[in-house]
Image (spheres, rainbow, N blue to C red):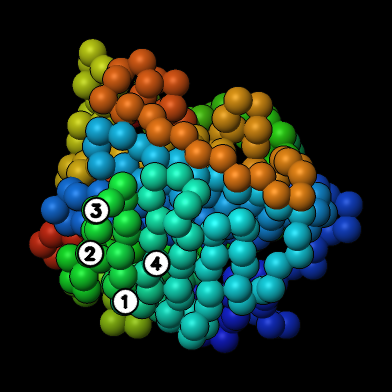
């Protein structure tokens, strides 16, 4: 069941009585993270960034990923430093809460790789919070105890890339964010694989999907697992329209991949709102960010929450026109996409665990 929340500060701070669980003192998988994307309806540069805190490991890390369809430029940073809750900073990466739940400022300082940015995120819709469900007994319990909320927004600012400036004018670029906290596998090690193995055991498919899209009058989000051989397990999702939250009871996907390259070509989605009529969406990708560059699924033996010392900053650039590079980078992939449905055209992210 979705719940619109208006009295929660973030990131890394929640007021009592807002459904915030107590942080276990001995579980290294406890995390708090924001993830953010910036995308253009015209298929221009696509940015993903985030900061995660892992207090039981004494680590905070972050990433910024920028693609233009030819290259993906990655910046990653990790530190043991404690964070100011409303202004988390990891090396050159910084986020600042200007108005809780409404306005944020994000910055990647220059001098740490081939790009930098500074922009503000202004919410288009209030956030909607969810709790991920657990596996019912006597099935094995999922190693998950996870709360999340999502929100779409407009952005204003600039991205600087090798001497050129990308002007993030209001209306030309859009954004979405995910704010999560709780227990998640894959923190500090390769536990993501154990998680997906549990999904397979339960017959839930084994490839994650996460979708957030904004139309003029509504915001749609849903999360689950999918098996490219057929079938999926819908976990949770909601539709926000006119201040009302409607839960999504089920989702069906038909995903088309290019047979030769494995590239994500298109998808057809059928959403079943609780107590309402089905909603059909056609999804067309505009650009792809490979989240492995931000350590989702791990990279070269390094995972979210890995202790890399007092401060570690690194960068690399991938040629994403190469089939070989895309295959090595693919994992949990974010596809900035156009969504066509009964409300006209919307834009957002279609995230799936496959489809280069």
Please give the residue where the numbered disc 4 appears in the rendered image: 118
Residue 30: give x, y in percent of width and height: 74, 53
CA distance separating discs 3 and 4: 14 Å
CA distance separating discs 3 and 2: 10 Å
Q: Nearer the viewer, mark 1 or mark 3?
A: 3
The answer to which quarter of the image holds residue 25 is bottom right
Left or right side of 228 for 23: right
Please give the residue where the numbered disc 3 appears in the rendered image: 164
Residue 169, numbered label: none
Q: Secondary structure at mark 2?
A: strand
N-terminal-most mark, 4 or 2: 4
Nearer to me, 33 or 170: 170
Label 1 environment density (alpha carbons within 10 Å; few <14, some 14–19, many ≥20): many
Label 4 environment density (alpha carbons within 10 Å; few <14, some 14–19, many ≥20): some
**Residue at horizontal 49 percent and vertical 45 percent from the top:** 75
Residue 124, numbered label: 1
Please give the residue where the numbered disc 2 appears in the rendered image: 167
- Could you tell me if the residues under marks 1 and 3 are in contact, i.e. CB atoms within 8 Å? no
N-terminal-most mark, 1 or 3: 1
Q: Secondary structure at mark 3?
A: strand
Residue 238: give x, y in percent of width and height: 40, 64
Nearer to me, 194 or 163: 163
């Amino acid at each position: 069941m979705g719940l619109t929340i208006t009295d929660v500060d973030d990131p890394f701070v929640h007021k009592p009585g807002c459904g915030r669980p107590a942080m276990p003192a001995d579980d290294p998988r406890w995390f708090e993270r924001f993830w953010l994307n910036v995308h253009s309806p015209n298929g221009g540069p696509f940015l993903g960034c985030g900061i995660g805190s892992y207090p039981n490991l004494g680590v905070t890390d972050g990433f910024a990923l920028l693609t233009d369809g030819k290259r993906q430029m990655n910046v990653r940073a990790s530190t043991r430093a404690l964070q100011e809750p409303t202004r988390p900073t990891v090396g050159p990466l910084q986020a600042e809460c200007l108005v809780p739940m409404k306005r944020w400022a994000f910055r990647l300082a220059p001098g740490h790789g081939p790009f930098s940015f500074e922009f503000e995120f202004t919410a288009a819709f209030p956030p909607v919070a969810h709790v991920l469900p657990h596996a019912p007994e006597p099935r094995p319990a999922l190693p998950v105890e996870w709360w999340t909320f999502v929100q779409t927004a407009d952005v204003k600012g600039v991205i600087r890339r090798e001497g050129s400036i990308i002007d993030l004018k209001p209306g030309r670029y859009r954004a979405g964010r995910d704010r999560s906290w709780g227990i998640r596998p894959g923190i500090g090690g390769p536990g993501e694989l154990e998680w997906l193995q549990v999904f397979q055991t339960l017959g839930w498919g084994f490839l994650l999907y996460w979708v957030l899209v904004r139309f003029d009058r509504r915001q749609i989000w849903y999360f689950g697992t999918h098996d490219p051989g057929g079938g999926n397990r819908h976990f949770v999702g909601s539709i926000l329209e006119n201040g009302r939250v409607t839960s999504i009871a089920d989702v069906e996907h038909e995903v088309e991949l290019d047979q030769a390259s494995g590239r994500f070509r298109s998808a057809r989605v059928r959403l079943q709102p609780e107590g309402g009529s089905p909603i059909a969406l056609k999804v067309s990708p505009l650009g792809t960010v490979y989240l492995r560059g931000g350590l989702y699924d791990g990279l070269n033996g390094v995972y979210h929450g890995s202790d890399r010392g007092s401060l570690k900053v690194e960068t690399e650039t991938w040629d994403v026109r190469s089939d070989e590079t895309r295959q090595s980078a693919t994992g949990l992939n974010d596809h900035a996409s156009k969504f066509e449905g009964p409300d006209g055209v919307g834009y957002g992210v279609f995230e799936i665990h496959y489809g280069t």
